[in-house]
Image: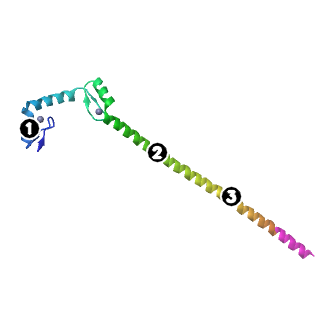
Amino acid sequence: MSNCQYCNRTFASESSLYSHQKRAKYCLKIQEQKKVIEFTPSFMCQGCEKKFVTKREFNNHENRCYDLLKKNVEARDKEILKLKAIINTHNKEINELKLQHVKEIMQIYRSMNERKEACIEEMAYNKLTALANKEEER
Ligand SMILES: [Zn+2]
Ligand SMILES: [Zn+2]
């Protein structure tokens, strides 16, 4: 089965399609029109890929083309999703930085505490040895 790409009629074989395209008047007419459109500088709708010969026709169509509108909305939705993903990674980074910051502060606090305790121990030790020395002196 072969389909005529111009008039959409179906044929049993390639050869009958070929002779149809060479002879059928209505098909030749369509072929002629298609050629005119194909070889005329034309404007193509980005949405539905329809071609227009004049800019006026094209503008008229573009303003009403549902497919084009849909494509634009889809493109914007994709853009929004991308931005959301970027925001998400940024939030994650910020949270990680916050966590790291907290960890650093905890570490500083801990080492300060350790130093404080070492200091108290040293003072206590010094006092005890001083007392012990006094005891010995008696
Ligand atoms: Zn045909
Ligand atoms: Zn369109």
Q: Nearer the viewer, residue 68 or 120?
A: 68
Residue type at the position of mark 3: Tyr
Left or right of 136 in this view: 80: left
* Residue marked by disc 1: 18
Disc 2 on helix, strand or loop? Answer: helix
Sort mark 3 into few (<14), some (14-19) or many (20+) by Cα contacts within 10 Å: few
**Residue 121 horizontal/vertical position (percent):** 77, 67
What segment is highlighted magenta in the picture? 126-138
Q: What coloring was used for the rendering?
A: rainbow
Residue 27 occupies quadrant = top left
Q: Earlier in the sequence, mark 2 or mark 1?
A: 1
Sort mark 1 into few (<14), some (14-19) or many (20+) by Cα contacts within 10 Å: few
Q: CA distance from mark 2 to mark 1?
A: 55 Å
Residue type at the position of mark 1: Tyr
Labelled pair 2, 1 in contact (Cβ < 8 Å): no
**Residue 85 horizontal/vertical position (percent):** 46, 47
Q: Is residue 129 above or below residue 47?
A: below
Which residue: 11% across, 45% down?
1
Residue type at the position of mark 2: Lys
Q: CA distance from mark 2 to mark 3?
A: 37 Å
Disc 3 on helix, strand or loop? Answer: helix
Labelled pair 3, 1 in contact (Cβ < 8 Å): no
